[in-house]
Image (cartoon, rainbow, N blue to C red):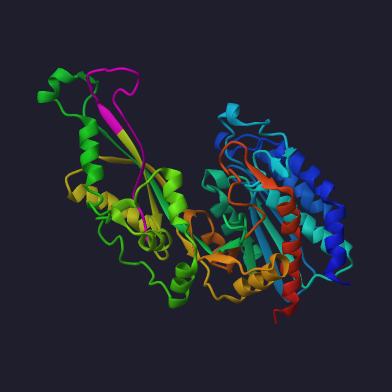
Amino acid sequence: MSLEKAFELIEKRKDIAIKDLAEFIAIASVSAKEEFLVEAAEYSAKLLKENGFETKIHETAGGPVVTGLMDVGAKRTLMFYDHADVQPAEPFDLWDSPPFELSIREGRMYGRGTADNKDEIVCRIHAVRAWLDAGLELPCNIKFVIETEEESSSKNLTDYVEKDLDFFKNVDGCIWEFGGSNREGFQEFILGVKGILYVQLSVKQMTIDSHSASATHLPNAAERLMHAVNSLKDKQGRILIPEFYDDIEVITNEESEVINNYNFYPEEMKEHYGLEEFRFGMNNEEAKNAYFTKPTCNICGITAGYQGEGGKTVIPKEASVKIDFRLVKNQNPDKILKNLRKYLNDNGFTDVKVDWSNGYPPSKTYVNDDFVKLCQRANKRIYNHEAAVQSTSGGSGPMYLFGDHMPVVSLGCGHANTNAHAPNENIYVADFIDGMKMIITVIDEFKNWK
C-alpha cells in the first residue's frame, strides 16, 4: 500500500479532525489559572485511546501528564511531546470570535489553542490513525507525552519524567510541540531552546512610604534596587555575574553555517518595532548571531511607589523587579542563581532579596543528527523545499528533559502570523491537513533508517 491511501483518508476525514479540535478548544485549560487541566488531560487520553494507543494519565502535584504508547515491536521509536494547556485569552474584547469556540473564517481556524498546541495533538494522532487505516505497517513504535502545565513553566513535568524514565529509553527521535512556516512560506525546524533563570528581587528600606520632602535623609527602595540591578550588566550588555560565561559551549562550524544561512528578517523586525537600529548598535548579522548564541539578562517588570494617574510625591518603602536570564548550551541556572546571590552580597547588596526563582537548562540537537536529516527528507517530500533550520529558539521550554535522552526537532502546522499567546490565535485549515501528511511522511522515513 502506498502513502496515497493514507493521504486520501486524511482529506476524507478532515471534518472529523476539525470536530475533535473544536471539542478540544472548548476546554478552557488555562494553566495560569489552574482551570480545566484535568478535563484537558482526559480529552487527550480519550483521543489517544480511540485511535489505538495504550494510554495512562499520570497524577502530579499540579496538572496531569498523559502518555500514549503504540508498541509494534519495531527497532526504532518516535516520540511526540505536546501540551494541552493554553495561555489566558484576555483581553476578550480583542477577539473577533469567542476564544474557546473554534471559528473558521476565510480558510483559517480561530480559537485559543489552535496554534499552541492543541492543533498539533489532534494533527499527530489523526495522522497515525490514517496510517493504520490505510493498511500500512508501522516501521516504528510511537509514544506521546502530553502535559498540562507547559504555559506555566512545566513546573511538575520534571517530577513526572524522573518517575517514568523507562518511558524515555530507546527513543530515536522526538517531534516537539510547535513549528510551522516562516514569513516566506518555508517550513522551519527548530533544534533547541535556550534555558532560563527567572528571579524576583526585592528590597525593603522602611516600614511605611514617606513624603518625598524627606528624600534629603530617608532611603528610597526604588533607587536602592535600581543600583543593584544596574550592577548586573555593563553599558554594552555584558553580564557581570562571576563565571557567567565560563561554561558556554563553543558553536560548531556546522551550527555557524546554519545560523549564517538563516533569514532573520532584520529589516522587517525593525519596522515592526519602530526601530532605527538594534540594541548596542549591532548590525543585522551581529543581531542574528546574538539571538542564537548569546545569553541575556532582561528586566521584565519593576514595581515601586505610586504608578497611578497624576502625581503623588512619595518615597517608596519597598520595590521589586522581575528578571529573566536566557541561557545557552551548558549554562546551569542553579549555578548562576548561586553566583547571583554571592555577587549581590559581595557588592554590598545583602539587603536585596531573591524572593523566588525558577528555571531549567538549555537543550540543543546537533544540526547534522540522523533524525534531523530524516525530518528534512520528509519535509522535502511534502512541501517540495528545504526546511529553514534554526539551531535554537530564543525562547525556552522543558526540552532538556527530552534532549538529554534523544534528538529533538520542533516542527508543525503553524505559520508566521498565528497570533499564538495573543487574541485571534489561528492556523490555516490547509496547513492543518498538510501537517498530518508531514507526520505520515516522517513515519514513512523510519523505514529507511537502519
Number of numbered callouts drawn: 0
- Residue 165: x %, y % from top left: 61, 63
Highlighted magenta segment, given as a residue range? 294-319
Identify which residue is drawn at 43% across, 72% down.
256
Residue 185 part of the magenta segment = no
Q: Please, is residue 423 above or below residue 231 in the view?
A: above
- Asked if one can make out residue 305 in the rendered structure from this viewpoint, the answer is yes
For the N terminus, give its image quadrant: bottom right
**Nearer to the camera, 97 or 299:** 97
- Asked if one can make out residue 170 in the rendered structure from this viewpoint, the answer is no
Seen in the image, is 59 located left or right of residue 239?
Answer: right
- Residue 212: x %, y % from top left: 18, 20
Seen in the image, is 206 located left or right of residue 197?
Answer: left
Taking the view exactly as shown, the residue that stands out farthest to the left is: 216
For the C terminus, give its image quadrant: bottom right
Residue 137: name its quadrant: bottom right
Q: Please, is residue 410 above or below residue 14 in the view?
A: below
Q: Please, is residue 417 above or below residue 250 in the view?
A: above
Residue 351: name its quadrant: top left
Seen in the image, is 303 located left or right of residue 8?
Answer: left
**Nearer to the camera, 43 or 420:** 420
- Residue 248: x %, y % from top left: 36, 67
Residue 308 part of the magenta segment = yes
Residue 72: name its quadrant: bottom right
